[in-house]
Amino acid sequence: MATPKGKYAWTATVGEKGQIVIPKQARDIFNIKPGDTLLILGDEDRGLAIPNSGAFSELFNAAFTGEKDGEK
């Protein structure tokens, strides 16, 4: 089965300390570097998600600075 363009799936094994290794291809595609902090979202019904940091940058900016899109 071919995957749609831009869609990926990987597996990771959880170690004894609860750590996972993000596959190299995923790190390369999403520019994840050592020392980066990742946001992990969890929903008991739907599972875990690790969104791209850019997905939340505008939200964080508005929350921490009080600015909305286009306002300074």
Image: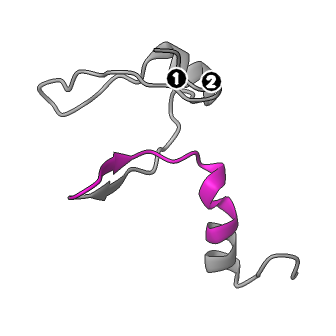
List the residue tagged with mark 1.
Answer: 26
Task: Give the x, y percent position of residue 68.
Answer: 76, 81
Tag 2–tag 1 contact (CB < 8 Å): yes
Question: Toward which corner of the image does residue 18 lie, by quadrant?
Answer: top left
Q: Residues within 10 Å of mark 2 (few under 14, many from 20)?
A: few
List the residue tagged with mark 2.
Answer: 29
Task: Give the x, y percent position of residue 30.
Answer: 61, 30
Q: Residue at x 65, y 25 (%)?
A: 5
Q: Residue at x 15, y 31 (%)?
A: 17
Q: Secondary structure at mark 1?
A: helix
Q: Residue at x 51, y 25 (%)?
A: 8
For the N terminus, the quadrant is top left
Residue 54 covered by magenta stretch: yes
Q: Amino acid at mark 2?
A: Ile
Q: Is residue 58 above or below residue 30?
A: below
Residue 49 covered by magenta stretch: yes
Seen as rendered, the residue at the extreme front is 1
Q: Amino acid at mark 1?
A: Ala
Q: Residue at x 39, y 21 (%)?
A: 10
The boundaries of the magenta stretch are 45-59
